Amino acid sequence: MNDASTTPPPAPAPWRGQGPVLAAVAAGGALGTAARYGAGLLWPTPADGFPWTTLLVNVVGCALIGVLMVLITEAGPGREPHRLVRPFLGTGVLGGFTTFSTYALDIERHLTGGRPVTAVCYLLLTLAGALTAVLVAATATRRLRRRPA
């Protein structure tokens, strides 16, 4: 005997659950990765050169993440963005644009290439630059939003 109260509810359709989120992240990631690739084509790094392009991409990406997170998390009642904005822009576009893996490979390349000072400088400069960029961008965004119109 099947009692209706013990029957589990039907599973939500994929397009109502995580499907759109996955699609938003994938689409955003494709755009962000293409932008990073384009930056590498515009400003290539020589094999033994300092990875300025990756440093710049990561710092700019972190600044944009600082702006985005303030705009999304502090939107205020009735002004919340669509639920796919954060996965598309934050995880997708900016996650695809910034790169931890290339950063790690650049450090390893300098270490194994006999340039430990360059590797450590790059490691510290990226860390300091990225954290400073998030802080400055988030603070500036908050101040601009509070400014009277």
Image (cartoon, rainbow, N blue to C red):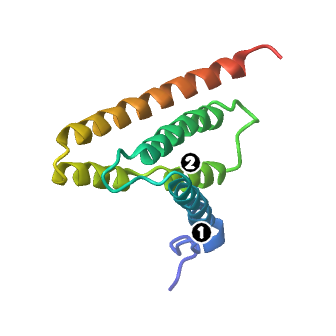
Mark 1 touches mark 2? (CB < 8 Å): no
Mark 1 secondary-structure assignment: helix
Quarter of the image with the C terminus in it: top right
Position in image of residue 113 (x %, y %): 19, 53
Q: For marks 1 and 2, give the CA distance.
A: 17 Å
Horizontal side, residue 123 vs residue 19: left or right: left
Horizontal side, residue 16 vs residue 36: left or right: right
Position in image of residue 92 (x %, y %): 55, 56
Q: Which mark is residue 90?
A: 2
Q: Residue at x 57, y 71 (%)?
A: 9
Q: Is residue 103 above or below residue 125?
A: below
Mark 2 secondary-structure assignment: helix
Q: Nearer the viewer, residue 140 or 20?
A: 140
Q: Residue at x 18, y 42 (%)?
A: 116
Residue named by callout 1: 19
Q: Residue furthest bottom?
A: 1
Q: Is residue 137 above or below residue 94?
A: above
How many other residues sit within 10 Å of disc 1, few (<14), some (14-19) or many (≥20)? few
